[in-house]
Image: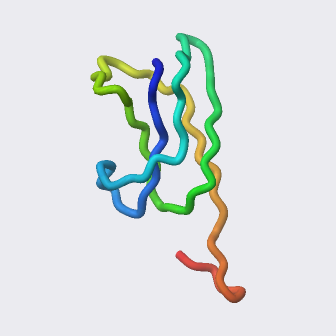
Amino acid sequence: MEEFSIGVGNTSNVSMHTECAYQAETVGAGEDVSLSCSAVARYVSLRREGGRDIDHVSICEFVVTGYPLISDGIYLN
């Protein structure tokens, strides 16, 4: 797959997500890629760019690492 992005947002409506990482080069079968995103949001989405449809995608592992938001020593949910 090539030309895809990672989006984030505070709603499950992915059309409202903001792009935070983009992969232009091809990631072949059996290969992996790591994308970094420093945005703060609740939901993460994968989007195919370039007006192409996705016929079939197998994602073996999708890891999102997050940290709790802290404001004035109070954890925010």
Instruction: State the image coordinates of residue 19 (x, y, percent, origin top left).
Output: 46, 47
Instruction: State the image coordinates of residue 72 (x, y, percent, origin top left).
Output: 69, 88
Instruction: State the image coordinates of residue 44 (x, y, percent, origin top left).
Output: 46, 49
Give me the residue at 54% from left, 29% from top.
23
Q: Quadrant of residue 51?
A: top left
Q: Is residue 49 left or right of residue 61?
A: left
Q: Quadrant of residue 13?
A: bottom left
Give me the residue at 66% from left, 63% from top.
67
Q: Is residue 6 left or right of residue 39?
A: left
Q: Quadrant of residue 53?
A: top left
Q: Is residue 27 left or right of residue 51?
A: right
Q: Nearer the viewer, residue 41 or 26?
A: 26
Q: Nearer the viewer, residue 5 or 71?
A: 5
In this picture, is 19 found above or below 58?
below
Give me the residue at 57% from left, 79% from top.
76
Instruction: Report the residue that reaches farthest toward the bottom.
Output: 72
How many discs mark residues in the rendered view? Answer: 0
Instruction: Report the residue that reaches farthest toward the top.
Output: 29
Give me the residue at 59% from left, 47% from top.
64
Instruction: State the image coordinates of residue 57 (x, y, percent, origin top left).
Output: 40, 22
Image color mode: rainbow
